[in-house]
Image (cartoon, helix red, strand yellow):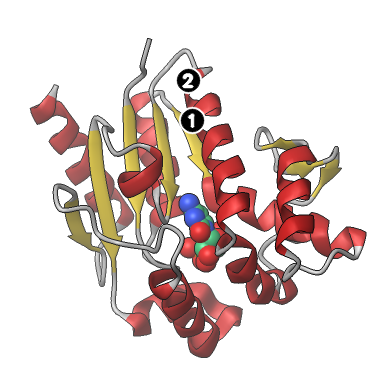
Amino acid sequence: MSRDIIAIDGPAGSGKSTVARAVAQALGWSFLDTGAMYRALTSEALYQGIDVHDANAMALLARDARIDTLPRIRVNDRDVEDEIRSEPINLAVSVVAANPLVRASMVGRQREIADAQLTGTVVEGRDITTVVFPNATLKVYLTASLDERSRRRGEEGVASVARRDIADSTREASPLRQAPDALVIDTTGRDVHEVVGEIVECLKNIK
Ligand code: CDP
């Protein structure tokens, strides 16, 4: 049976994780941060000394690595929750995420995870509304000005955020795109609760 899905996409710092988590909590649904999966895989490559540019080695790693997302993100039983937002991972993750073989593995896992839940799932990432769950119950595209997104990212800095924006939206494999039927919310200067309320209200109107 296919479960209810709220799919949320958007660039770095648009508020996806915070908003998706809060929407899941408000509805009593599960939450899946797919960026954390790409980050965990990147962390494992660095840990094992695998060159992230080696597409075949990365494809094998994506096929074989065990990735658990709850309660904390773990890869091959190693807890990586605290290190996946570090600068070395910020630098390498766009290369890993641009690999179509890696994406195919991750997308399959993401569908399986959502399917295994007893509740609906709020899933957030870059290709969730366009590739992973194009038939989601509700699709949302979050955005915000580059200035505000960089401010939210703090240490990462505007140059790194801008670099990932370009890498994510110009890559050949599943680039970040706004789905034509997505609810678009600009979160610049907006309160999280307000944005969450708008999404929950929209879901109510659909169902
Ligand atoms: O939190 P932030 O938006 O900065 O990043 P994230 O959601 O943790 O994702 C990190 C990186 O993984 C992104 O810059 C993308 O390159 C990649 N990603 C992706 O390609 N597809 C997804 N569904 C999620 C993340």
Decide: few, some or many residues near mark 2? Use Cα within 10 Å; few <14, some 14-19, many ≥20.
Answer: some
Residues at circles 2 and 1 in contact by the CB criterion of under 8 Å: yes
Q: Which residue is mark 2?
A: 115
Q: Position of residue 149 (x, y in %)?
A: 40, 75
Residue 207 position (above or below residue 101) = above
Q: Which residue is mark 1?
A: 111
Find numbered disc 1 in the image and state the secondary structure of the residue it sits on.
helix
The reply to whether residue 39 is in sight is yes
| Quarter the C terminus occupies | top left
Say which quarter of the image contains residue 13.
Answer: bottom left
Say which quarter of the image contains residue 87.
Answer: bottom right
> Can you name the residue that lies furthest to the left here?
205
Find numbered disc 2 in the image and state the secondary structure of the residue it sits on.
helix
Residue 65 position (above or below residue 161) = above
In depth, the one of 174 and 10 nearer the eye is: 174
Question: Disc 2 residue type?
Answer: Asp
Q: Residue sitting at 90 percent across and 65 percent down?
A: 49
